[in-house]
Amino acid sequence: MPPAPPGKASPRPASVVLLLAWLILFAGLAAAGGYVLMLPQGHGTAQVAVALDPPADASAPAPEPTPVTAGESEAMQEAAAESAENAVAPQEAAADAPPRWQRFSQDYDEADKRPRIAVVLTGMGLSSAATEAAINQLPAGITLSFTPYSRRLDQWMSLARTGGHEVMLDLPMEPTSYPDDDPGPQALLTALSPAQNVERLNWILDRADGYVGVATVMGSRFTTSEESLLPVFEALKEQGLIFLDNKASENSVAWRLAAKIGVANAVNDRSLDSAQASRVAIDARLVQLEDIARTDGAAVAMGRPYPVTIEALREWAKGLSERGFALAPISAVTGRQRHHRGITQSTQAK
């Protein structure tokens, strides 16, 4: 090694190593912060550290897209189409799903050609003794409709369904004798606005689940008002529920309007115990019911869970099959009554 020029001392090896260590450390920090460290090298500069991820520059031009081959493009299109199909599939399935009344209906042999008779008892859930008797003593083919005011509504309806009964909810409506006869705090009234009646209807419908529809209670005034009924039927149609008209008024427009706008519906042909709750009167009404079913192919009766009504129905049902009739849940006679078939066909023809 040639001697150092006069007046200049050669750097010590330890000092050089220490200086390089500091420079390397500083370069690492600069790179982490997004900077480039330039060190002198002779008459020029040398790049020691470069930032790994420099800050984005909004003004910088966008990078050129990576070329895609024809095969890759076709595969991407197929994947996108499959993804779109899968996204639409749940909506299509929901649209194709059966209405609520069919999903919660009890099994019934549709191949049975015998005339069908449906019996619906309303007011269930008010008396524990009467409710238990109806659930446990009556045949499963009898439909039970529960008041929305019951404190044990879910429990009663669950027990009824477990016992094979189809279940409904009572729909209290304004009678002509209102307010002397009060159908309750959530009853539908002609004096209320459509929005208010729909709000009350939703309160009733939200009280339970697993039911096929609603059965009117009272309602001799409300069921004669097409203006009041229309928003109610639109809501029931959207929910996919049956509307059972108790025919409290001979001037009721309920079943005709329901059929016109496409609401599944049925009509009471005979009230078993509204006029007189006696065994003789109930037995006579059941004979009339059989005559209607024999002529029309289907018939509906409504009653209350009185002890005499439960006893009469229990005895009547024992020989029903031998007399050539089938005891059916309300869903199995919906749309099958003769006058309903007529209005449905005339509506479809228009």
Image (tube, rainbow, N blue to C red):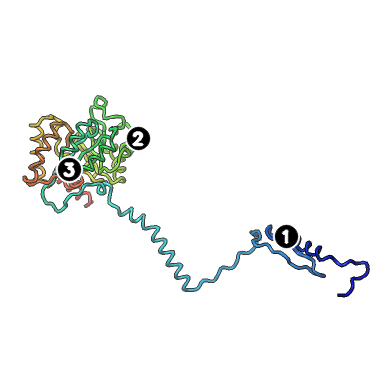
> Is 65 positioned to the left or the right of 219 in the image?
right
Lower position in the chain sequence, tag 2 or tag 1: 1
Residue at x 44%, y 64% (from the top left corner): 80
Q: Residues within 10 Å of mark 1 (few under 14, many from 20)?
A: few
Label 2, secondary structure: give it. Answer: helix
Query: What residue occupies the far top of the structure in this picture?
Result: 180
Residue 10 location, x and y as percent?
Answer: 87, 67
Left or right? Give the position of 35 relative to 135: right
Q: Earlier in the sequence, mark 3 or mark 1?
A: 1
Label 3: state its secondary structure: loop
Mark 3 / mark 2, whichever is N-terminal: 3
- Disc 3 crowd rating (10 Å Cα; few below 14, some 14-19, many 20+) is many
Q: Which mark is residue 196?
A: 2
Residue 99 percent across, percent down from the top left:
28, 49
The extreme right residue here reads 6
User: Label 2 sits on what residue type?
Assistant: Gln
Residue beneath the point at 38% across and 57% down: 88
Q: Residue at x 30, y 45 (%)?
A: 239
Q: Position of residue 124 (x, y in %)?
A: 22, 34
Provide the secondary structure element on which disc 1 rests. helix
Q: Is residue 28 visible?
A: yes
* Residue 140, image quadrant: top left
Q: Is 246 placed above or below 342 here? A: above
Q: Amino acid at mark 3?
A: Ala
Within the image, what quadrant is residue 204 found in? Answer: top left
Viewer-side residue, 33 vs 264: 33
Please provide percent x and percent y for residue 350. Answer: 23, 51
Q: Which residue is mark 1?
A: 25
Question: Is residue 260 visible to the viewer in this orientation of the structure?
Answer: no
Q: Which residue is mark 3?
A: 140
Q: Amino acid at mark 1?
A: Leu
Residues at marks 3 and 2 touching, judged by CB atoms closer than 8 Å: no
